[in-house]
Amino acid sequence: MFRFLVRRTLGALVILLIISAVTFWLFYAIPRDPAMMSCGKNCTPDMLKQVRHNLDIDHPVPVQYWYWLKGIFVGRSYGDFGNCSAPCLGYSFANREPVLGTILDRLPLTLSLAFGSAVVFLVFGIGSGMIAAVRQGKWQDKVASSASLVASSLQIYFIGYVAMYFLVAKLGILNNPSYTPLTQNPFEWASGLLLPWLVLALIWTANYTRMTRSQLVETLSEDYVRTARAKGMSSRSVFFRFAWRGAMGPIVTIFGIDLATLIGGAIITESVFSLQGVGRLAVQSVNQSDLPMVLGVTLLSAGAIVVFNIVVDAVYAVIDPRIRLA
Amino acid sequence: MTSTDQQPFLSVKDLKVHFSTEDGIVKAVDGLSFDIAKGQTLGIVGESGSGKSVTNLTILGLHDPARTQIDGEILLDGKELLTASERELEKLRGNKMSMIFQDALASLSPYHTIGTQISEVYRKHTGASKKESRERAIEMLKRVGIPQPDVRVDDYPHQFSGGMRQRAMIAMALVCDPELLIADEPTTALDVTVQAQIMDLLKDLQQEFGTAIIFITHDLGVIADIADDVLVMYGGRCVERGTKKQVLSSPEHPYTVGLLNSMPSLDGPVDVPLSPIPGSPPSLLNPPTGCRFHPRCAFAEKVPGGKCSSDQPTLEVVEGRGSACHLELSRRADLFADYAATSHN
């Protein structure tokens, strides 16, 4: 286990290094000058030069990359703007603040959105998938299957607005989406995010219903499940200790990747519900050619995926003793 | 000693198991009766799809009631199993009656240790503590000949060899000293030495506990080794039954004759070709009219009036011996002997 973690962590760092380098290179491949945008309309060559200097982009690209990398470990100084202490992911061109701080500001909302909706779609998805598998071919199965087909064809930018119109504006059942930190007021935190959770979960639930159903249908017909029945185990024990145990693995795998994707920012959801999370930050920073911010958000998304992959593999080894970590 | 000498421990009467499929009704078992006494071994022989395994899964009550139509009677120690509730069956399964499955790798859970899988049966049925059950599991593993049972008890099935897995499966089936043990081709996947060890093990355990054993196989050699009585199945029906000696040395049904002829003999000349039974097992969806074996039977034309293709022969059992065939009983021995002589030329 220890060797596995060391090996995978080193691998993850290499991946993140490559991703940051590629992002850096891609950014400068776009014919758009961040200094021009910062400088404004009546820009003289002298001003432009000064802006370049201020943004610390008056060096060749590889040197800039080196400074950026160095900043992570030893911090950076930005002259007039102040210091950015290690770990420094750079200074935003647009809002003139350290990238890391801005991302950490936005992260709680995105994490709340991700984990909150994950709880909803896991409970409903796995629950309805289990019911469909146990009642195979009966009406419960048919309802679950058709509902998940419909739900998976919906799009957030459609169902999100429809839900807002009816549930918030017309009927007033739910609050207008807003974000209050959990630590400040848990009730407002939940009530403000309930609608985004439900809408986001509605679309993801369908996947989990279908996957849970198909995995369970498969494991329920396994020989070892029959053996468990043949030795007198109760139906509940047969279902949860044997069939569900076998069905869990692939669901955990997909869940890990899905959760990582959500942490990287639910771009459309945040836009539809006007929530200032990491997803919108990503869109804004791309529009503003804000390289340090683009890099920061990209690394967050990539890091989440890399980390959750390691976690999923470790969890998988716990679920299935046949898998050995090395 | 035949099973009729004693009060039967398990009695199956006119069992019918029909599955509804999209194409129609599959008659997997169609009117099967047999008895088995304590301490006796009944060998059930037949090709794949003859209804052997279905019969035994039905005894344990493992079929999905929604898709299966089951008729007849199964009495275990006087208790009717077909009308018993799932709760009652749970108490019997693994306890009073248990089953050894064919493919031990697939039949053991890959997610639980061998020890857990054995001890949970004991715990469930005796209410023993975790510690006691674990000790019982170690004891069982020792009894079935697993080396270092106190260490191997914590292994997972994939860490066992094929023979050891089958032994563990047997240990699991026997942990509550069942009175009826159903062994569904327990040795098919194993090499001959391991097979012999496992057969000896079953015989020892039977002597010790007086277990009634139903042994399902398509290997007549295994039958000759372990069975007291033999039941030959074809197309979901019993075509012949009797003691092992009766069935193997003086068979009364052409199908049994065919099975025996398709076996190599160790004491005969080596270059004698085997004579397989022509054709393939019957469709259980649309079984042949009349005798289900008649399309493949070498003797069908010896019966006058095409009776074989129109009338279903009945199984008349006298003192545990009987067969279902239209051929006159007195002519059969000669006909079979002639057939054996010609087919081996």
Image: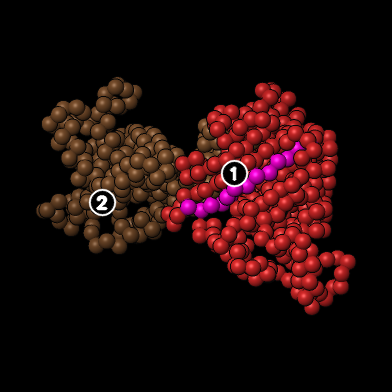
Chain colours: A brown, B red
Mark 1 falls on what kind of element? strand
Q: Position of residue B251 (x, y in %)?
A: 77, 59
Quick check: is A7 in the magenta stretch?
no
Q: Residue at x 68, y 44 (%)?
A: B34
Q: Which of these two is toward me, B94 or A103?
A: B94
Which quadrant would the N terminus of chain B be assigned to in this image? top right
Q: Residue at x 76, y 64 (%)?
A: B331
Q: Position of residue A182 (x, y in %)?
A: 33, 25
Quick check: is B32 in the magenta stretch?
yes
Q: Which of these two is toward me, A117 or B184?
A: B184
* Disc assigned to residue A286: 2
Q: Is residue A181 above or below residue A99?
A: above
Distance of mark 1 from mark 2, alpha carbons?
Answer: 74 Å
Q: Is residue A168 left or right of residue B223?
A: left
Which quadrant would the C terminus of chain B be assigned to in this image? bottom right
Q: Which residues are magenta?
A: B25-39
Q: Which of these two is toward me, B277 or B102?
A: B277
Q: Is residue A124 left or right of residue B295?
A: left
Mark 2 falls on what kind of element? helix
Q: Position of residue B158 (x, y in %)?
A: 67, 47
Residue of label 1: B15
- Chain letter for mark 2, please: A
Q: Which of these two is toward me, A199 or B307?
A: B307
Chief secondary structure of the magenta portion: strand
Kind of residue at badge 1: Leu
Q: Residue at x 68, y 24 (%)?
A: B126
Q: Residue at x 15, y 56 (%)?
A: A44
Kind of residue at badge 2: Val
Place residue B15 in its image quadrant. Answer: top right
Q: Is residue B255 left or right of residue A30?
A: right
* Residue mark closest to the camera, 1 vs 2: 1
Place residue B10 in its image quadrant. Answer: top right
